[in-house]
Amino acid sequence: MLAAIEAGGTKFVCAVGDEKGNVVERIQIPTTVPEETMPQVIDFFKKYEIEAIGIGSFGPVDVNKDSATYGYITSTPKPGWKNYPLVQTIKETFPVPIGFNTDVNAAALGEATYGAAKGLDSCLYITVGTGIGAGAIVQGNLLQGLTHPEMGHVLVRRHPEDPYQGRCPFHNDCLEGLAAGPAVEERWGAKGIELVERTEVWELEGYYIAQALMQYILILSPKKIILGGGVMKQKQVFSYVYNYLQQFLNGYVDLPELSSYIVSPGLGDNAGTVGSLLLASQALQGENE
Ligand code: ADP
Ligand code: ZN
């Protein structure tokens, strides 16, 4: 039995299943403070014989295995979670192989293995939710350098008629600061779900996302782009993304039909869970090699 932990800023999704992505049981636990959330996470897994655990976490996280703080959540503004030893805490109770990566990297792995990018050795998974983040598969591997990529914080050109100052605590008007769910809510004064009829909301969203996609395409040349997260439940954003991307790229890169190139997650809301099961499976294989 493999365990999956999708550690999100609002909820932890815990599941047990197999390396094929089959889920036996799954629960959600609210992300409050570690002292409250973690005991519930650990309790859930105690009733199973766990062979390995995969964790896809909100970040930034330390994914460098040689680092003294490997397995930590690092510079998050989320109260209680800054410099939190997530992997170490789990390992104290479950001394099994643990695979650890970002939530979006886990989702990218899930989508590349069983989802919209199945069979491709290259894809990009982007979430537009409470934050914006992306994970890339390049030549069959999750892209990692000094640390994991932080593509949600790229700079974009502000729309000339957008006076909103942005809300990233580090950069104000980076992509996340201008286009993540909380920015949409603050700029327009209502929850995303209450703004469905306001086309200008989603057009502006498409304007910013398309700029970021242009940069990702120019730098990484992914074979498929998957746009997930709560905000992308507004399917109308996709057509604005296609239109603006076409306009910005201006024919410079030869892309496939955009509606099949930039898509919703094939695994729906399960991309992160399936990807975390795969991280667990990889950790187990690594241990047995
Ligand atoms: P998280 O990022 O915490 O994993 P989500 O991906 O669900 O969670 O993102 C939550 C954000 O997405 C919130 O800001 C919320 O307002 C927004 N959101 C969720 N559902 C929708 C929807 N159907 N339409 C527009 N915005 C949504
Ligand atoms: Zn930022």
Image (cartoon, helix red, strand yellow):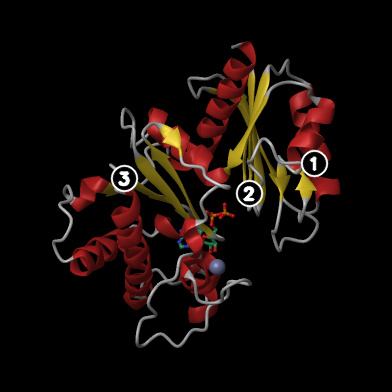
Q: Which residue is mark 3?
A: 222
Mark 1, Cα crowd under 10 Å, few <14 / some 14-19 / many 20+, is: some
In the image, is residue 257 above or below residue 20? below
Q: Which residue is mark 2?
A: 8
Sequence order check, earlier mark of 2 and 3: 2
Mark 2, Cα crowd under 10 Å, few <14 / some 14-19 / many 20+, is: some
- The residue nearer to you, when weighing 120 against 259, is 120
Residue 99 visible from this viewpoint? yes
Instruction: Give the left or right position of residue 243, taking residue 60 as reference.
Output: left
Q: Quadrant of residue 86?
A: top right
Q: Secondary structure at mark 3?
A: loop
Query: What amino acid does circle 1 point to?
Result: Met
Q: Quadrant of residue 97?
A: top right
In the image, is residue 164 above or below residue 190? below
Query: What amino acid does circle 2 point to?
Result: Gly
- The numbered dot on residue 59 is none
- The residue nearer to you, when weighing 39 against 66, is 66
Is ligand 1 within 8 Å of the beta carbon of the residue shown at mark 1? no
Mark 3, Cα crowd under 10 Å, few <14 / some 14-19 / many 20+, is: many
Give me the C-alpha separation between circle 1 and circle 2: 13 Å
- The residue nearer to you, when weighing 6 against 158, is 158
Q: How far across and down, in percent of the image, does residue 169 sit? A: 63, 72
Q: How far across and down, in percent of the image, does residue 231 sit? A: 45, 60
- The residue nearer to you, when weighing 102 against 6, is 102
Residue 17 visible from this viewpoint? no
Is ligand 1 within 8 Å of the beta carbon of the residue shown at mark 2? yes
Who's the residue at 69% across and 36% down the image? Answer: 66
Q: Pick the quarter of the image with the N terminus.
A: top right
Sequence order check, earlier mark of 1 and 2: 2
- The numbered dot on residue 38 is 1
Q: Secondary structure at mark 1?
A: helix
